[in-house]
Amino acid sequence: MFTEQLPLRVDPYKMAKAASEFQTSLSLADLTRVAELLTHTQGVLTLQLSFAIDPQGIRTISGHIQGEVEVLCQRCLQPMPWTLDSEFTWGIVHQDADAANLPRAYEPVVLEGEELELLPVLEDEVILSLPQAPYHKAGDCKLDLSQVHVEETASKAAPSKENPFSVLKKLKQKH
Ligand SMILES: [Zn+2]
């Protein structure tokens, strides 16, 4: 397997004929649409891509994206670590209508012209493998549901109690 810079635009037919393989890394900061969904963009994702021609003559690109990212917990709005690990096989088609003829295991990627821009398709792949509504596991979440309940009960009971600040005032006056 080659380790080299992945070109941003590829000719999938040439690459498939050459059975090209890449092992590279993607900077999170370069994935602008992905970055919007993350709490920070430090770090990289590792990427493996293999171009091939399957027995039916379909040009395919198989890939594996892995990495550690942080998304925002929708309950407590604090960062939540998420391990990305996505394997996929793209089947190259020339129009949307051809997608129906692809084997089910392939995700259709429409090639307009001769070259394919890899980054937008890779971004789609990463976005699909992020959780749609991320929540910490119970116990990890800063906003514990049992605590919310306690706070609500406390605030309901508050009017009958003495204001804690006036208690403080009294204590200060004594000393
Ligand atoms: Zn949380």
Image (cartoon, rainbow, N blue to C red):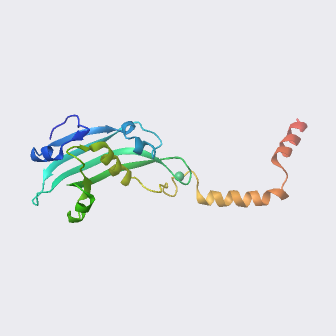
Q: Compared with residue 65, is residue 99 higher up or lower down, i.e. above or below?
A: below
Quarter-of-image position of residue 99 = bottom left
Image location (x, y in percent) of residue 68: 37, 44
Quarter-of-image position of residue 144 = bottom right
Q: Residue drawn at (37%, 49%), measured in percent from left and top?
A: 83
Q: Residue drawn at (36%, 37%), measured in percent from left and top?
A: 30
Image location (x, y in percent) of residue 112: 25, 49
Please give left or right for residue 58 compared with residue 174 in the image.
Answer: left
Quadrant placement of the C terminus: top right
Q: Residue drawn at (26%, 53%), measured in percent from left and top?
A: 110
Give 111 or 173, whichever is nearer the viewer. Answer: 111
Image location (x, y in percent) of residue 148: 64, 58
Q: Is residue 129 visible?
A: no
Image location (x, y in percent) of residue 156: 77, 60
Quadrant placement of the N terminus: top left
Please give left or right for residue 104 compared with residue 146 in the image.
Answer: left
